[in-house]
Amino acid sequence: MTIDLSDQVVLVTGASRGIGRAIALQLAESGATVAVHFARSEDSAAEVSSSCGHGSQAFQADLSSIDATEQLFDDVIRAYGRIDTLVNNAGVALPAPMDASIDSWDKAWSQTMRVNLRAPSLLCRMAIGHYQERGGGRIINVASRAAFRGDTPEYMAYAASKAGLVALTRSIARGFGKENICAFTLAPGFTRTDMAQEFINTYGEAHAVDDLALGTLTTPEDIAPTAVFLASGLADHATGATIDINAGSYVH
Ligand SMILES: NC(=O)c1ccc[n+]([C@@H]2O[C@H](COP(=O)([O-])OP(=O)(O)OC[C@H]3O[C@@H](n4cnc5c(N)ncnc54)[C@H](OP(=O)(O)O)[C@@H]3O)[C@@H](O)[C@H]2O)c1
C-alpha cells in the first residue's frame, strides 16, 4: 500500500514539538505540504517546516485566543488557497488541585478548555465551512486515553476537555458525512514528550512502563503513522472512530 499525500495541504497545530512534530514530519514524508503551527517554539517550528519541505511553512498563534485561532486558519488559507486535512493536536495539561484557591482552579480550567476544546472547535467550524465549499475534507482530533479512563484528581480538567473533543469529533462525523467530511479521534496514552517528562521526573520511567501492556514507552513516532493513514482517505469509512494508541494500558 502506498500513501501519497502530495496533493494535500495539512494544518497541524502544535507541530513545533512532541506528537505534532512527528505527525508533521511523517505527513511530509508522504508528500504533504504542512502548515506547521506553533505558539512559542518559533525556532523548532522553523526547523520542522524546513525539514518537511514541499513548501511547508510555520504559522504562529496562541490558541487560547479566539482572534488568533481564527487568524491562523485565515493565514493558512491565504498562503496555500486550501486545507485538505486539519490535525488538532496542540494541547496543554495543567494541574488544578482540589485544594487550590478558586482563582487558580478557575485559571487552570479556563486555559485548558480554551486551548484543548474551544480552539479545536473553532478550527473544526472553519474547516467544515471550507470543506463544504470544496466538496469535502478530513479532521483528525488528538484527544487522550484520559477521555475514557479518566485522569488523576489534579488533571480532571484535562480529562474533561479531551472527552469533549471526542464528542465533538463524533458529532462532526455524524453531521457532515454526506458532505464528504470525515472526522477521527486519535487517543494516545502516555507518550514520551515534554508533556510527559514531569511525570517521568517525579515517578520514574519504570513506573510509567509498569502501567503498559507493552514493555516500552510510546513515542511520538508510534502515533504519527496512524495520522498519515487517516489523512490518506483509506480509512474514511471509519469516520467517527477513535483510534487508541496507548500500548495496551487501557483497552475498552
Ligand atoms: N504526551 C502524552 O503523554 C499525551 C498523551 C495523550 C494525549 N496527548 C495529547 O497529544 C497532543 C500533543 O501532546 P505532546 O505530548 O506532544 O505535547 P507537548 O510536547 O507539550 O507539545 C505541545 C504543543 O502544543 C502547543 N501549544 C501549547 N500551548 C499552546 C497554546 N496556548 N496555543 C497554541 N499552541 C500551544 C505547543 O506549542 P509551542 O511549543 O510552540 O508553544 C506544542 O507544539 C496534546 O493534545 C496532548 O494532550 C499527549
Image (cartoon, grey):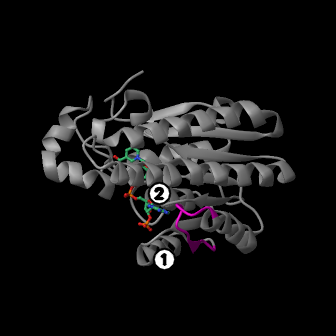
Range of residues picked out in magenta? 55-66
Residue at 58% over, 72% down:
59
The residue that mark 1 highlights is 46
Residue at 78% over, 68% down:
81
Q: Amino acid at mark 2?
A: Gly
Furthest-top residue in this view = 252
Residue at 52% over, 53% down:
114
Percent x, y of residue 119? 58, 54
The residue that mark 2 highlights is 20
Label 2 CB sits under 8 Å from any ligand 1 atom:
yes
User: On the rendered image, what quadrant is the C terminus found in?
Assistant: top left
Percent x, y of residue 125? 71, 50
Q: Are marks 2 and 1 in contact (CB under 8 Å)?
A: no
User: On the rendered image, what quadrant is the N terminus found in?
Assistant: top right
Percent x, y of residue 65? 57, 64
Q: Earlier in the sequence, mark 2 or mark 1?
A: 2
Q: Residues within 10 Å of mark 1 (few under 14, many from 20)?
A: some
Q: Quadrant of residue 69?
A: bottom right
